[in-house]
Amino acid sequence: MGQIWLWRDDGTRYRKKVYAKTRKNVLQKIRQLRKEQEHGISPNIKEETVKQYLLRWYQNPSLRPTSIDSRRVNIERIVPYIGGVKIRSLKPSQIQHVYDSLGERLSTSSVVQTHSLLRKALSDAVKEGTIIASPIDRVINTPKVERKEMASLKQNEVSTLLHLDNEWQPLWTVLIGTGMRLGEALGLQWQSVDLDLGSLVIRRTLQKITGRGLVYQNPKTDKSRRTIFLPDLVLKAFKRHRTRQFEKRLQVAADWINEDLVFPNEWGKPLEPTRVNRALKKSLHAVGIKHHIRVHDLRHTSASLALRRGIAGKVVQEMLGHSNYSTTMDIYSHVDPDMHKEASKQMNEALGG
């Protein structure tokens, strides 16, 4: 047994007894208590387990519902491995074990997401005085994203897809022609589209949240709230689509649920994103495009086409709604080898070649 004088939160001094099997362990505990006091951590706070802390931490009312849902999913991945460990005793080796175990059954990107969440949670634990330092900073082999070759449609494939005459063609035209996210397109209302000026405004997005279904949310960042000017081809697609939608509404009559959506289902309600992915697969098959393209790859296609045409990267960034210019360039500057070949030709001319 040992003892140490400490300070309470109210400024009064008191003596705390320390128990351990050996003198060495008693001294270690005393040093730890002294160190924690120096860093503003009260020795009287209830020691939480990792699970208790994460469940207290993740439901931040200032976060978007999708962010809270993402936190919950990743916490469920972590808890089976270190949920019962006291957060003030958490070791880097235990965190490494979480990553190694998750890597055996999840994709690298999923493990990276879990790592990002735990890093943020432990960083906040340091800020609030629950722990002195984050043990994640001493983990050597943290998971990293593997950059994969980005899928996109070629110029001739875009033309082929957009000449397809089916009910989904207007949506493909809008996604490729504007670079919008699928959630932005599915949450778009006619009141946000100005067919006279040829522009639209992104004011909200549609997201699917576990346990809540389809939910409208505000755009994630200020840059996501943006005005997009429409190419003539996209503007014409909007006009044709509006006429066809009006005809459908007449057929459905009183059963139509008017949410003013540009791309609703047959009854005027929001479209399920999974249904859109299936529809794209069928559309690509119908025009003979056999390689795998997701709906999100239409956004990549839009950015690649814009950069290939010489549209300034800053303009492409604002069109896509990226928060930072560097994000746009990191993702797309390496996409098309032809862009680099063209750049080398222009440099050759600049050098007098």
Image: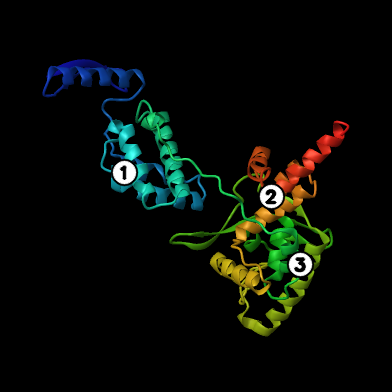
Give whichever of 2, 110 is nearer the camera: 110
For the question of whether residue 329 can be seen, the reply is yes
Q: Position of residue 295 (x, y in %)?
A: 61, 61
Q: Secondary structure at mark 3?
A: helix
Q: Which residue is tagged 3?
A: 238
Front residue of 153 and 349: 349
Q: Which mark is residue 320?
A: 2
Locate residue 269 relative to residue 74 in the image: left or right.
right
Give how far across and how far down residue 276 sits, in percent. 59, 67
Q: Which mark is residue 259?
A: none
Q: Nearer the viewer, residue 214 or 114?
A: 114
Q: Amino acid at mark 2?
A: Leu
Left or right of residue 143, residue 231 in this image? right
Label 2 secondary element: helix
Q: Return the disc, 3 or 1, that comes first in the chain's sequence.
A: 1
Q: Position of residue 109 (x, y in %)?
A: 48, 48
Label located before the other in sequence (2 or 3)? 3
Residue type, label 1: Lys
Residue bearing the label numbered 1? 51
Which class describes the residues within 10 Å of circle 2: few (<14), some (14-19), or many (20+)?
Answer: many
**In the foreground, 305 or 264:** 305
> Which of disc 1 and disc 2 is earlier in sequence?
1
Residue 168 pos. (x, y %): 67, 71
Can you tell which quarter of the image residue 36 is in? Answer: top left
Q: Going by the image, does 203 lie left or right of 19? A: right
Q: Quadrant of residue 173?
A: bottom right
What residue is at 28 percent from the left and 31 percent from the top? 89
